[in-house]
Amino acid sequence: MSDLRDAAMQSKAWPFEEARKIAKRYAKKAPEKGYVLFETGYGPSGLPHIGTFGEVLRTTMVRRAFEMISDIPTKLICFSDDLDGMRKVPSNVPNPDALQEHLQRPLTQVPDPFGEYESFGHHNNAMLRRFLDTFGFEYEFYSAKDFYASGQFDEILKRAAERYDELMAIMLKSLREERAQTYSIFLPIHPETGRVLYVPMKHVDGEKGEITFDDEDGREWTLPVTGGHVKLQWKPDFGARWAALDVDFEMYGKEHATNEKIYDAICRALGGRAPNHFSYELFLDENGEKISKSSGNGVSIDEWLSYASTESLSYFMYLKPKTAKRMHFDIIPKMVDEYHQQLRAYAGQDLKAQLNNPVFHINNGDVPQSDMVVSFAMLLNLAAVSGAQSKDVLWGFIRKYAPEANAETHPGLDDAAGFAVRYFNERIKPTRVFRAPSAQERAAMEDLGRALRDPALAREMIIRKNAAMGKDDPVAELDYTSEEDLQSVCFAVGKNHEFANLRDWFKALYEVLMGASEGPRFGGFAAVYGPEETAQLIDLALSGGLTE
């Protein structure tokens, strides 16, 4: 264990780098609360989404990394701001018109349009908890409604009233003049309508912990800041929550980065210690535009998980969190195969390399072996050439290539085969375009077809290629179950037909035979699909059977 901890203390993996920063907070003295607190926030105005998954997953990775280098207990809180007023009616709920009269009411006071829970906020909180539980996250759930109403927040709210002018000074620096005229850190909840009011304060009594204001009809009200009668504006709420809970670490998207100094200043003004924070870059769609819940661009978590495993999504989330990444359907196969490449590499790595390997953090140190004897990209190509409508078709090819494999011994591969069939039929098949070969490409493909049927002829082609390159290396008998030997045959044919760039030759094979511009190594495809079957596919393409 000491070797592992020593290696973790030196690791350059970003979760360990963040964990070491947190450890420095308590280098001299353990936290009085008895644990290190990690927090993630959630706005329950809609259903959980892929950003929610990423934030909790990444926070959990830092938490687990901290637990490896420290004996201080940890806790993760998922905080739902369900006291926030409903600013607009979601378009994806039943009978949205019925919710119009509830605008600006706290989400926990808005009727559940699905008719399942006591409020819309309770409904979305339940969806969040189900979502987090599905992925096995360990957390404690906090509701802003309960936090404000139960008294847990009272001390900080009273202090906010006492230090109102100081807190307002922090906030006013960041506001435009027009907004500053009516701004208050406190948002009263109207005693009659239940609406969250954005109104200026007439008076804040720090001693009594009360606020006085006029409502929208000009009536004057005085309310205590405690007991759930008032909530804080979202920026002050951020910092006040840190102070109340003594949060040690929180991460958020870069849209919050400009507010970090405000959050920290609010926290300190209320007597708290600002936490460590981590600002991550946002996700972009295939056009480089920011992914938005409302516009529906990009990939949803349900869509990703209909085409690939949770681990592939976790792998995507782990990579370079401070770099903006394009998140679109085309990257899913790449993430699956990269994840399994890292799994295969892990067993042969030393401890230092293992701690830097994403799969260590994705699997919390309990790293499984990959059972993907065929890559996901290869499965997609098999689905393409076979017209597979079920994974059973793909298993027919897999068993010939890897007789020891079956669905029971290779469950990950079995799942991937099903995912590949769905991905091909839904994402690739509708848009793929085959093309006819050029004269040079046709002649080369005719030769390749003959070579795939005749290993002796293929050997002669390799010898001819070597001679043209000034080599006289001996050429052994070819093994047509070997990816390397079949790749050598493809390579020799391309060289013998004088392709200036062999990349163009392999690209032509995929465009003519599969309607795609790229794929896994063609020798590997021929080994899995079968040399004779690949030759038949070439015959079909050259006869025009794929472009008709």
Image (spheres, rainbow, N blue to C red):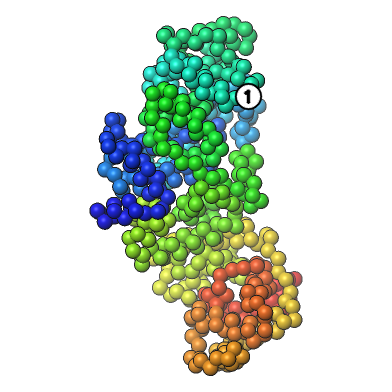
Residue at 59% of width from left, 15% of height from top?
A: 199
Residue type marked 1: Arg
Up-down relation of residue 407 to residue 74 (above or below): below
Up-down relation of residue 61 to residue 94 (above or below): below
Quadrant the C terminus occupies: bottom right
Residue at 52% of width from left, 12% of height from top?
A: 191
| Relative image position of residue 510 (x, y in whole percent) | 64, 71
Asked whether 429 or 470 is in front, the reply is 470
For label 1, the residue is 176
Residue at 49% of width from left, 85% of height from top?
A: 479
Asked whether 33 or 332 is in front, the reply is 33
Q: Is residue 438 left or right of residue 399?
A: right
Quadrant the N terminus occupies: bottom left
Under tag 1, what secondary structure?
loop
| Relative image position of residue 387 (x, y in whole percent) | 61, 67
Q: Quadrant of residue 28?
A: top left
| Relative image position of residue 509 (x, y in whole percent) | 65, 75
Decide if residue 85 is in sight here: no
Asked whether 64 or 418 is in front, the reply is 64
| Relative image position of residue 529 (x, y in whole percent) | 55, 75
Asked whether 344 or 383 is in front, the reply is 344
Residue at 40% of width from left, 73% of height from top?
A: 404
